[in-house]
Amino acid sequence: MKTIFFEISAEDKIKYQNLLSGQDVEFYEEKLSTENTEKAVDADILCVFINSEVKKDIIDALPNLKYIVTRSTGYDHIDGAHAKEKNIGVSNVPSYGSDTVAEFTFGLILNLSRKIFQASHQVKEGGNFNLSELKGFDLCGKTLGVVGTGRIGKNVIRMAKGFNMNILAYDLFPNTDYAKSESVKYVTLDDLLSGADIVTLHAPYTKDNHHMINKDNIMKMKKGAYIVNTARGELVDTEAILLGIQNGIIAGAGLDVLEGERELKEEFHLKYSDAQNNINYKTLLENHVLINIPEVIITPHVAFYTEEAENEIINTTIENINSFQQGQIKNTIKI
């Protein structure tokens, strides 16, 4: 079977070549798109990352395709339903970097609460040691609202307790045993938004929770609250964040993901490729406004990116590929 990788760095290519020694494998640094589908036309197994949109048109253009592997936990970039119709298996990496992302989340929270980024910037850029704009606040005694209590959410809660924070949690499927053992209070999303000093998102993205945080419920947040998103950009309506800041509801935000971040990345690289006709220019403009707000920290979807997490991704991806070649599909996505 031929396996074709997209979005693979030169460093990772060497690792995968060594682990898949003797197998028929090709690697491309670029993402898979409708403009380069011909590079994948011989693929029996397709291995991608989050920027490759493996939708119906691409799936239909690959006659030999039998299996899709994404090197990510999220799989909203893959048309899993259409793949299932064509009897094409789809697997992900269901659990990697749960500590990694939780640690990064707290990095953002600490940057927001103590204005670390602003403090460093004013010293480096202007030699300014004035403290007048740098007063922060303690996390001890504050309430953290955690949306999504999977592995990452639970690790965030564990870390928050180390700061003596109070916890509110929201999940479509509350874990009552966990709530009792860890003294976590599950509430409605509205109650979480109105009661938390900091709201952090750790839910997977689905069509059902698109714009989970929106122009209506963001106005229910506690005045002066902060919002952190290391999950998926589309969970939050970008316009809602801007309105929240403009109306003094939100004091700041830490965003490792943005709605429409693929288009934003392509714009910064001065290319739009096949996405050009589908660009949401309104969201693109709103993202530019967000980037220039001092109280908003934006990072390039890097929360998962550590040596340890990357090794987990590689090992699980290899396991997925080898298992499929032996007639077994592991880590099948939920449709």
Image (tube, helix red, strand yellow):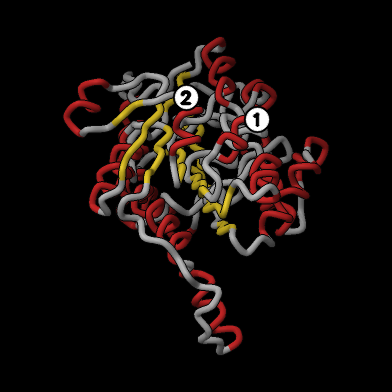
Q: Secondary structure at mark 2?
A: strand
Note whether 177 is above or below 149 in the view shown.
above
> Foreground mark, 2 or 1?
1
At which x and y percent is residue 184? 27, 32
Disc number at residue 2? none
Note whether 30 is above or below 118 in the view shown.
above
Please give the name of the residue rendered at 76% of the width and 58% of the height, measured from the top-left corner. Answer: 270
Residue at the disc numbered 2: 67
Say if mark 2 contacts mark 1, CB within 8 Å. Answer: no
Please give left or right for residue 58 compared with residue 47 in the image. Answer: right
Q: Secondary structure at mark 1?
A: loop
At which x and y percent is residue 335? 48, 16
Please give the name of the residue rendered at 41% of the width and 49% of the height, measured from the top-left corner. Answer: 304
Q: Residues within 10 Å of mark 2 (few under 14, many from 20)?
A: many
Query: Label 1 sits on what residue type?
Result: Asp
Out of 208 and 26, give the one closest to the viewer: 208
Q: Does the image show residue 85?
A: yes
- Give the mark nearer the N terminus: 2 vs 1: 2
Q: Does the image show residue 64?
A: no
Please give the name of the residue rendered at 67% of the width and 38% of the height, measured from the top-left corner. Answer: 33
Residue at the disc numbered 1: 216
Image quarter in which the N terminus is found: top left
State the residue lying farthest toward the top: 85
At which x and y percent is residue 97? 34, 45
Out of 250 and 262, give the one closest to the viewer: 250
At which x and y percent is residue 65? 54, 24
Query: Label 2 sits on what residue type?
Result: Tyr
Q: Residues within 10 Å of mark 1 (few under 14, many from 20)?
A: few
State the residue lying farthest toward the bottom: 127
Out of 195 and 260, give the one closest to the viewer: 195
Please give left or right for residue 120 compared with residue 292 in the image. Answer: left
Between the residue at mark 2 and the residue at mark 1, the CA separation in whole angstroms equals 41 Å
